[in-house]
Image: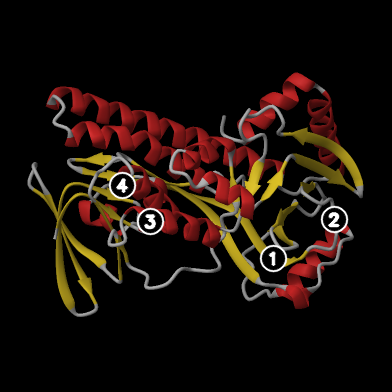
């Protein structure tokens, strides 16, 4: 099967790129290994630059309709506010962070892709070989026991942190593991600070709390070691111990434990294959940058693909791809540094240092210029 662009990976990043290209008349096929969507994916936060990108493919309005607009973030210690950060000035069009479960975001993106081309998404195919002859790229895959072959002018790997395509190409990565472990889950919202994200800066480690649609609130607790087999009851007890708020374990709808690592591919462009999203750079989930960073990769890549397919001068196209590679890897490094700062702020501290940190946060929150700067950094501006 031949097409202009073959996208390996039908998650939020691959689907966004597919919609962006399809609406400009580019032929696209999306290979997705899964037969059905993962309903327990972790990502929930959509930052203003990503919302602007989604607006460009006519998905933002539906996402905003279905999500929760978080206009403020609040830091709390011992039941008292340490400071508040407003997102009012971060974007004229989208002055908020949107909270929407990833599965719903993927549904909206898939609906848009199907509207543009009902045959674009091919499920149940696992890539097993990538052959780039310098003019066309062939991807061999398997659908069950059947061998299938796809040919394209360009291939984009958006197949996640454990990218099969990246491994097949032999692209090296720089990996970093962190001594940060988290347990998180979704529970019925007990009526805490409606529409506000709350960070509990407690001696035992940070507890994060975010509103979700349908009266649900997500709780994220930092742990000193991997969560092991901890369940909803243990998570609810940890939240109560550190914050005084007691989520009802019986209302739990999602539970996930994770230890933090980052991986950065040493290059994002390998011949006529491009890595984007988690395939190119896995970032700590703390701060919610990963999915957004992938969308911004795809947004930057889309015009380069169109320039290549329209017969642009080879030397000019090569220069544009080099600039893309350097620029997006730099953006990934900045996102990783921001995630490291976010994790650092959430680590346990002895009393005097905890007090000093909280005083610093309070002073920053009380200074409008600093508050705006922090809000812009947090929302990837």
- Depth check: 240 or 115 in front? 115
Q: Is residue 354 above or below residue 38?
A: above
Q: Quadrant of residue 140?
A: bottom left
* Quarter in which the N terminus is drawn: bottom left
Q: In this rendering, does residue 213 appear at all? A: yes
> In the rendered image, which residue does mark 4 sit on?
22
Give yes or no for contact between labels 4 and 1 (Cβ–Cβ under 8 Å): no
Residue 167 lies left or right of residue 180; in this view the side is left
Q: Could you say which is closer to the camera, residue 321 or residue 20?
A: 20
**Separation of residues labelled 2 and 3 (CA atoms):** 39 Å
Quadrant showing the C terminus? top right
Is disc 2 surrounded by few (<14), some (14 to 19) or many (20+) residues within 10 Å? some
Figure colour scheme: secondary structure
The Cα–Cα distance between marks 1 and 3, rounded to whole angstroms, is: 32 Å
Pick out the residue farthest to the top: 369
The Cα atoms of the two marked residues, 2 and 4, are separated by 42 Å
Crowding around mark 1 (Cα neighbors within 10 Å: few <14, some 14 to 19, many 20+) is: many
Q: Kindly state the secondary structure of the residue where label 1 is placed.
A: strand
Disc 4 and disc 3: Cα gap in Å?
A: 10 Å
Q: Indicate which disc, 4 or 1, sits on the residue closer to the N terminus.
A: 4
Element under disc 4 = helix
Q: Earlier in the sequence, mark 2 or mark 1?
A: 1
Q: Nearer the viewer, mark 1 or mark 3?
A: 3
Residue occupied by mark 1:
186
- Under tag 2, what secondary structure? loop
Q: Where in the figure is residue 264, as x and y percent of width and height?
A: 40, 43
Q: What residue is disc 2 on?
A: 192
Residue that numbered label 3 is attached to: 115
């Amino acid at each position: 099967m031949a097409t202009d662009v073959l996208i390996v990976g039908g998650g939020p990043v691959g689907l966004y790129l597919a919609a962006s290209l399809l609406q400009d008349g580019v032929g696209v096929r999306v290979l997705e290994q899964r037969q059905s969507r993962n309903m327990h994916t972790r990502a929930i936060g959509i930052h203003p630059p990503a919302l602007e990108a989604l607006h460009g493919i006519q998905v933002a309005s539906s996402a905003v309709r279905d999500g929760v607009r978080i206009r403020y973030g609040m830091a709390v210690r011992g039941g008292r506010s340490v400071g508040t950060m407003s997102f009012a000035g971060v974007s004229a069009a989208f002055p908020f962070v949107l909270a929407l479960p990833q599965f719903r975001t993927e549904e909206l993106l898939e609906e848009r892709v199907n509207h543009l081309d009902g045959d674009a998404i091919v499920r149940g195919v696992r890539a097993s070989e990538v052959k780039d002859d310098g003019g066309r790229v062939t991807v061999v895959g398997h659908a069950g026991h059947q061998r299938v072959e796809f040919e394209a002018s360009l291939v984009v790997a958006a197949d996640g942190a454990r990218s099969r395509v990246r491994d097949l190409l032999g692209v090296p990565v720089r990996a970093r593991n962190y001594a940060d472990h988290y347990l998180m889950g979704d529970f019925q919202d007990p009526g805490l600070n409606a529409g506000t994200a709350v960070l509990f800066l407690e001696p035992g480690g940070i507890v994060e709390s975010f509103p979700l649609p349908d009266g649900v609130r997500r709780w994220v607790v930092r742990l000193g070691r991997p969560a092991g087999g901890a369940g909803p009851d243990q998570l609810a007890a940890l939240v109560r111990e550190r914050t005084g708020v007691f989520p009802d374990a019986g209302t739990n709808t999602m539970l996930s434990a994770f230890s933090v690592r980052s991986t950065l591919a040493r290059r994002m462009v390998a011949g006529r294959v491009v890595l984007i999203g988690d395939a190119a750079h896995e970032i700590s989930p703390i701060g919610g940058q990963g999915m957004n960073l992938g969308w911004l990769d795809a947004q930057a890549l889309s015009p380069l693909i169109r320039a290549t397919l329209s017969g642009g001068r080879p030397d000019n196209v090569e220069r544009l791809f080099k600039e893309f590679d350097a620029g997006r890897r730099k953006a990934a490094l900045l996102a990783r540094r921001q995630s490291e700062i976010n994790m650092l702020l959430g680590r346990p501290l002895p009393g005097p240092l905890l007090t000093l940190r909280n005083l610093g946060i309070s002073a920053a929150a009380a200074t409008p210029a600093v508050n705006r700067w922090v809000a812009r950094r947090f929302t990837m501006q």
